[in-house]
Image: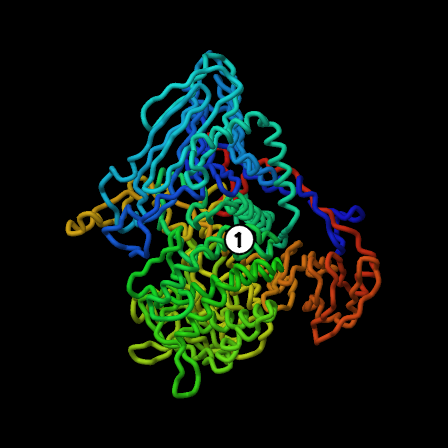
Amino acid sequence: MVSTGHNPEKVNLGGFEVDYSSYLRRHDVVYKSPADRPFEGLPIGNGDLGALLWSPSSGFQVIINKCDVWDDAPAGNFDGWSAQMEEKYSSNRGCGTITIDSGLPVNDYFYLSDFEGRLSLYEAEASFHSQTPFSETDIWGIISEVQKVGVLKYKDELEEEVSRRVNLARWGSRIFAHWYKQVKRDPRCGLEGTQSGHDDLYLWIHQKLREMEFVVMARVVGIEGHIERDHSRSVNFVTSCSKAADLVVYYTVVTSEESSDPLSQAKEQLERAVSVGYQAIRQEHRRRWAEFWPKSFVYLSFNNPSGMEGQRNRSGYISDPGDYLENLWYITLYLVASSSRGRYPANFIDGLWSWNRDFRAWAHFYHWNQQEVYWFLGPANHSELELPYLNWRFEMLPHAMEYAHQLGKEGAAYNDVANRRGYQDSRKGMELNRTPGLQIAMDFWRHYQYTGDEEFLRNRAWPVMKQTALYHLSILERGEDGKLHVPPSSAYEGLAYVFLDTITDLAAIRQSFKAVAEAAEILGCPEEARPFVEALDTLTDFTIIDLPACYYKKRGDELFFNRDFPFLADYAADPRFFATGFTGDDRVDLAKVFSIGFLVDNGQPFTWKQSEPQHGKYMFRGTQEAPVFPAGIVGLKDRGTERFRAAVTGAKGNWTPSHGHAILPIVFARLGMREELKKYLLDFPALYQYFPQGFFNYTVLETFHSYLHDQYSTNQVRDAGHPEEGEHPFRKSPFVHFSFDTSGVFCAALTEMLLQSYDGVVRVFPAMPSHWSGAFRLKVVGGFLVEAILQEGEVGSLKITSERGGPLRIELPWPDKTEEVVTLDESGAKLSCERHGNEIIFVTQAGESYWITTQELLRVSPQKVKFSGEPNRTPKVYGRVQIGKGRDF
């Protein structure tokens, strides 16, 4: 709900305030049918410990994971596809399950009369309620950051007296890192080292891994019962028989890296939690999350039908797809906050919510995908959630320096694939993908840009920035033209091709060397950056080439993409892929594109689309767009230039639904391609959001459909233990998994649509499509919090809060009213500003707020807009996907 207090029919374009406690409840995830498959469970977490709560037929279960439970391979670099190493890689391991079971089919579709599941984002709490002719059951769950424990509150009323079993179990398994291509068929892998135990109060599983040990422990209070051990992998608390039960389960996980005596430490944590009590724990938990949410705000409304072509539910057009996309943004922020506060980053696959024993798709940290999880956090004003990732990258710096030394170079060489101890995949050819180190360095730099934490810059960011820059400086070669050139390398993960002057390297070097120079000035050591500044002066430029004639055709005096050409044809022609179809503007403004590089074997310039029709080899998505994103070298400041127009042509030509980790929607935003971005965002859920709680996967839905809905579908895999036997069929359905790189791309595209500041100029609504309304409270580089609202095509007054002081440069969102713009401080006094065309610069003071507005807006005396809401009560349907589950019994 949006109101002004004066005229509810038309939103006033002044500032706004948010009732977060009611507004976030409109985005609760609601299930009207059971989460009867584990991967439909509702996720909770405290940033270190995570759990999926789901509802099997006879009760409820939480699947428990922790970010620092690792089974480590021997020290040293590794081969990421070695048959000998299969099932020996370092991997995060599942902790176990807790099941509350009455022995009655309380969640069985045959008997349900009522059911509701709810994930409350504002309170970070999951709950289920079910009712049958013979039972009424309720459960809610949270995981406390303060107490380091999970809490389950369970209550039931049954038709007859029964005993309930609270079961703690752990079944280890193979990790199946390469489940789709290479597996080890020995089922004994992962089963060893498990031992259940109990005393009069506590039940536990003690797990020994190769180097680490951990204990998962539970205690049941509020009901009488006894503890009995099933076997080495299972132990139960068995209640006395009764018609009604009201109990609380406290659980925790402690590793041998946290305590030399994990068993005693786990008991201590649970004893403390029990003494505090679940009500006080819940109150503290809610207070902390209530402090989390007001740091940012996003509101979207697409209430003009022309802005939502093709998006239908069972009743016709959805009234407001903006609400759906906004819901996904808040769900993703909740998930990152629930999984990114521990000693290690949660993996981009599954986060803290792996559901099937020890299965861990890919097993390792993959640079490109892992970084995508964090791209939107600076603007979302939650840079603290980047720290587990950045701390891990900093700790692996010595390994990266050793790897560079092995390659005969200075500095630090970060590889694309690494394990939790910082050792890297050193297969031959992996060193050709050189961009990870510089992009990781820029993750550190952006953290400083948003936080202003100079201690972090000096002690964490600077060592990584300098050493990765040194490595790239050492590989550059002086050519006969006097320019510095990049020797043979690959474009990101596209190892099938090797180029000279690869665009991804050139973009990363330009961005990073410039940032190193800025950091050196801040830290008072500019002389240390001099070699990098000098290198930039002679570094060869990007190459722009003619768009191959087969990719376009002429109509009159205009050029249009030839969508009939193989591999350029848009998947939108197939409604299974795109709901809305290709953008209506298929014109080619400039028949030129960026070259990815010069092929080593023939010296010819190469463009992305050549890879498939001519060679049938894989080229990693996003390579041609590297100067736009993540490097930020080409953008809206370059409008009208050949570079900018070539980037637009490349982005349009590369429009195909591929993997969810492809950066094209972010590129659309950075280039101000409003209509293309609109189409992509509207289609994004239908392509990648398969799961009802809002989880994504990185492949288009048709590709993953067989995993979700065909339990007999198989991949063809080879046995790593006996590769000579060839391939054999292997089930797909046990290997369903989630991916948070995809949701990170979605959130980054959405925030870049609303606000940009990567080049030092603040741009408000730079890529907002026509007929879309919105409001936001987001952060920009320099530590400024920006609040803005857009309604009926008009941008209201902007509120700027300066955290650190200093100058702010902003592009005015009223291009035809620049002479009317005024800047005010909180008292209403006008401030003097420097004007540079459509931009202004003014100096701010730390802790002060400012308004940028127009004379016209001042004349109407803007009132505050108030955002509030009602709790969501139904699943949200969006074409073929939904947030929540509808009633189907």
Q: Is residue 497 above or below residue 390?
A: below
Q: Is residue 106 left or right of residue 281?
A: left
Residue bearing mark 1: 386
Q: Position of residue 809 (x, y in %)?
A: 68, 68
Where does residue 830 sit, x and y in percent of width and height?
82, 65
Residue that extends furthest to the front in the rendered view of this protein: 260
**Element class at badge 1:** helix
- Is residue 303 or residue 762 the one in the foreground? 762
Display colour scheme: rainbow
How many marks the image carries: the answer is 1
Locate residue 395 relative to residue 827 in the image: left or right.
Answer: left
Residue 434 vs residue 791, the one in the foreground: 434
Q: Is residue 90 visible?
A: yes
- Residue 856 occupies quadrant: bottom right
Residue 434: percent from left, percent from top: 39, 67
Q: Is residue 369 above or below residue 509?
A: above
Q: Let me know if residue 634 appears in the view.
A: no
Looking at this view, is 91 or 879 the one in front? 91
| Residue at (32% x, 44% y) in the render | 175
Q: Nearer the viewer, residue 30 or 279?
A: 279
Q: Position of residue 528 (x, y in %)?
A: 53, 73
Residue drawn at (47%, 28%) of the image: 267
Kind of residue indicated by mark 1: Glu
Which residue of the protein is positioned furthest toward the bottom in this rendering?
A: 481
- The quadrant of the image that shows the N terminus is top right
x 70%, y 73%: residue: 838
| Relative vertical location of residue 612 with respect to residue 392 in this rendering, above or below | below
Q: Name the side, left or right, on which 882 lies relative to 290.
A: left
At 15% from the left edge and 52% from the top edge, which residue is drawn?
Answer: 724
Q: Residues within 10 Å of mark 1 (few under 14, many from 20)?
A: many
- From the viewer's perspective, tell me whether residue 303 is left or right of residue 725: right
